[in-house]
Amino acid sequence: MKKVFFSLFVVAISCVFLFSCGSTDKDKGPIKLGIAGAHSGDLASYGIPSINAAQLVVDEINAKGGILGRQVEIMAEDDVCKPEIATNTATKLVSSGAHVVLGHICSGATKAALGIYNDSKVLCMSPSATNPALTQSGDYPNFFRTIASDDAQAKLEVDFALNTLNLKKIAVIHDKGDYGKGLAEFAKKFLEESGKAEVVLYEGITPGAVDYSAVIQKVKRSGAEAIIFGGYHPEASKLVSQMRKKNMSTIFISDDGVKDDTFIKVAAQYAEGVYATGPKDTSSNPLTIKAQKAHKAKYKKDPGAFFLNAYAATLAMLNAIEQAGTTDYDAVVKALREKNVDTPLGSIRFDKKGDAIGVGFSIYQVKNGKYVELK
Amino acid sequence: MLTFEEIKKSFLVSLWFIFLTFPIMVIRVNSNENTIDWRWENIAIVGIASFVLSFFWRDFFRRKKLGQKKLSKDKQKSSALIELLNSKKEIKYGLLGAIITFAIAYPFVLGPYQTNIMISALIFVVLGLGLNIVVGLAGLLDLGYVAFYAVGAYTYAILNTQSGIIGHGLLQLSLYLNDLFGTTFFEIIAQPWSFWIVLPLAMLIAGICGLILGFPVLRLRGDYLAIVTLGFGEIIRLVLENWNELSNGPSGIAKIAKPNFGVSLNSIESIPFIYFLMIFLVLFTIFVVNRLQISRIGRAWMALREDEIACQAMGIDTTKTKLTAFAMGASWAGMCGVMIAVKTSFINPASFTFMESAIILSIVVLGGMGSVIGVIIGALILSLLPEYLRAFDDYRMLVFGATMVIMMIFRPQGIISNVRSTYKIIRKQKI
Amino acid sequence: MEHENIKYFLELFLSGLTKGSIYALIALGYTMVYGIIEIINFAHGEIYMIGAFTALIVSSVLTMFGFPMIAILILATGTAIIYSSAYGYTIEKIAYKPLRQAPRLSPLISAIGMSIFLQNYVLLAQTENFMKFNSLIPEFEWLKPYKEIIGTEELIIIIISAIVMIALTLIVKYTRLGKAMRATAQDRMMARLVGVSVNKIISFTFIIGSALAAIGGVLIASYIGQINYYIGFIAGLKAFTAAVLGGIGSIPGAVLGGLVLGWTESFGTGYISSDYEDVFAFSLLVLILIFRPEGILGRSTSQKV
């Protein structure tokens, strides 16, 4: 008897709840593009460019009369890159009827939010979440991204260190963060598998610590020819400057988090010669030129990080809706996988796991205060 | 009121603030690009704002001074209000009824987003009530409370996803037991553990962690205790961050299952269920804390808070009393940890920093130490404030910090100060 | 090989000494404030950050006007000290003074709020990005051959910290002001009775503590070459640990605590692993406090009934 009573209660709650929020009609009205990411706080500089990018694309499309005769509407929600807030953000976007979502920016927040999108069959495309598990685990069929994953980056760094620079002793250092440590783990794994070089040191440093000289002495003692560093530019510039000040010429190879102009500005003369991986240079692509010009015209400054990735993601999602002729989830996913779309990153489509085909990394080196792509 | 003296004072204050904020407000340097912005207009803003605010500031302290003389009267007033609530049953039950109706109607009226936010707020209510046991009742300043929160969250995450060495160990154990007894233990221990089992288990484990922390800090008092608990909190977080085999490191654990409510639900449909579960847990916590407060152990805690030596002299075992306070406080945090893991379905060590401990402590102090209603109000304010301050966008945390300072200046004893229960002997008059 | 080991030890020792000196400079502020009014001034780390930012702003402006290096060094450091002291003074007046009679935990919450406020104030008024901090300290030519072991900046940090700390000890020990400070720390009521202006002494303590933090801020920013609004929080937490480790309220204790913490971290990193750098620091703290609950040099106060 009790059980029956309980199930009645459960059903009642579900009914009332669904009734109260499930009334939005998804097939009429504007196409809603949710944008989630860090829009305030210290990581805002990664999130704001994606809003700007989407705004530019949407403005252009709406001016032409929209997609399938429907206007596109942007709903931007802040998640401050925190997983517990990202679930709120995702709930808000889903319950206000977002058809597709651009975001999230950070991998952790993305992982937390994806379950909610997946249950509601909302497609989600990130311009910047690089954690390999997001696509490779197969847990998130609704997830796509326009940036290559961390293991691809680590593989490139390791290949470069082994085959181009012919190094034998390498220290792998990371900043204990999600991004840095994940990358360092892959780098270590690839180095060990190759058998060509020895990982003489594998250490995590504390981000924001006052000083890294003890770690640097340790690197020196280990006799490493090069450091592969996983992490962001503040720590990288501290490490590099302190090493150079101590007359150490150890080669420094790092990742996309370091391939940032701020790194060169802060580390100044010490940045010279540092290698970093970054998205392939597409600055000669006409779409890139157009996007950047539009940004300059509207916002009066240069676009920030992941701008092109976000621009490409918005284009890809809206294009897929147009190709599919509907906002239906399965049809849009099918279109994303099958139809190529021209973006600032080149002509891309997506593989089964959700990674973009045709988006990759290349190696850059700091030469005369600028990152130069190595061919 | 606007005497010359007053204006002069305010003028000096505004000059001082213009001087103080000059480099940071007016000059914005970008040493990366070698550019310097001069924002002279900010001088005017700072000057006018501090000029006006200084009037309020002085006015407030003048009133406070006056108020202190009338303190006894005020006290009567506030207790009169409480008495009114207690005596007039219609008002009390009416208010209670309104709150209950509001709580029940909440998820249906306001939709999943608001409900989700409210779940977070309720988690903070329980966290605040838990920490209130340690700080408010027993008077032990704990700055590492978040450690137990993390323990709870990771207990559920690991047992539910069967990840890391613990997952592996359980699998091995089940195989070993299979060989030993020939029955399948696999189903029992090497499967994703159910929420309903882990919830009490996590409370237990967090409680044990509280005991473990309690032992070394028994001799410490006041601020020494604060820094050691802070260190303990950081150690737990660093271990979670570095020990990949245990906790999957900084990448965190994803895809943590929601509890099974007997029907299959997706993540949005399950929100009201989690909400009601959380309401139930809040009520449960309030009930237990209320009972504890007037129990033998609760009175021992309060005695400990007031005077440790007198407490000892009265024959109270201070070791036992302190340890139970730590263990009890920690187990509530463990429960909240499980709930946050359920709510977010993803956890990583970055969610358990010192800042979280500081916020939970602020809830307790801001609400009024030792007072259950105060802590509840404090938790609702501090967890909902940043969410609704979204409108201020970038100024959100600035306003948040300022609110904390201002609240403390205005009401240092918290929003609702703890009213000690007093006993009145009512003699029945003989007729 | 033996020689190599000694050199490595020496390098780690010096690295710990540099780090420890900075911790000690900031820890002094915590310990002095605690000694006098028994509150943990959580906003102290932010004062250090504001000192560094002021120096950055002043030095950038002066560089633009083409001042010589030495003038920039003196003016930037001087302004940083003045401004940090002014902030310390104002914070005390706003966030702590009204709370003198309040329950013990209220000033702590007020301090945490102040810390959040100041961080965001700098974040909004300046920038969230890391800014390059051009070293204000000229490089010593004669030190170049020893660069691998100790750089100019490290040497300067160690020397200046030592000078400052000795000066502070002398002030506290031998001047009238120092005497008044010690009297206030011992018994505020009694000090007032014998004619010490307690409010002034408290303000003065905040000013000295903040000035030390500013020196620390300028030195460390020159050394690592970059700052952002968040540097104060991490350094402040460590310095607070150092102050408690040495025995909060004791000036030599703060110095010793800072150095011990610096060495623990650098030797822990050098000989074990930097993965658990902070774990070593906090474990040491717990261990020491278990055996000496009042810190290494803290006065053990017997509780009176």
Image: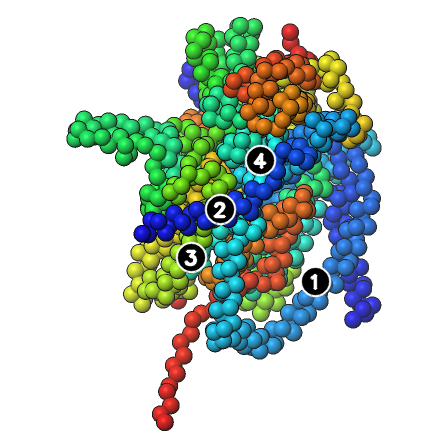
Gap in angstroms between the C-alphas marked 4 and 3: 32 Å
**Type of amino acid under label 2:** Cys
The disc label shown at residue A81, or none = 4
| Res B33 → quadrant | top right
Coordinates of residue C205 in the picture (x, y in percent): 61, 53
Residue count near mark 3 (Cα–Cα under 10 Å), binned few <14, some 14–19, many ≥20: few
Q: Please indicate, yes or no, whether residue B395 appears anywhere in the rendered image.
A: yes
- Chain identity of mark 1: B
In this rendered view, identify the residue nearer to me: A300 or C63.
Answer: A300
Quadrant, the C terminus of chain B: bottom left
Badge number at residue B57: 1
Q: Chain of mark 4?
A: A
Element at label 3: helix
Q: Which residue is mark 3?
A: B283
Q: CA distance from mark 1 to mark 2?
A: 53 Å
> Relative to residue B344, is residue A128 drawn left or right?
right
**Callout 4: SS:** loop
Determine the image quadrant of residue B199.
Answer: top left
Q: Residues within 10 Å of mark 1 (few under 14, many from 20)?
A: few
Q: Which residue is located at x 75 percent, y 22 percent?
A: A292
Q: Are marks 1 and 3 in contact (CB under 8 Å)?
A: no
Q: Identify the residue at horizontal 46%, vertical 17% (top origin).
A: A188
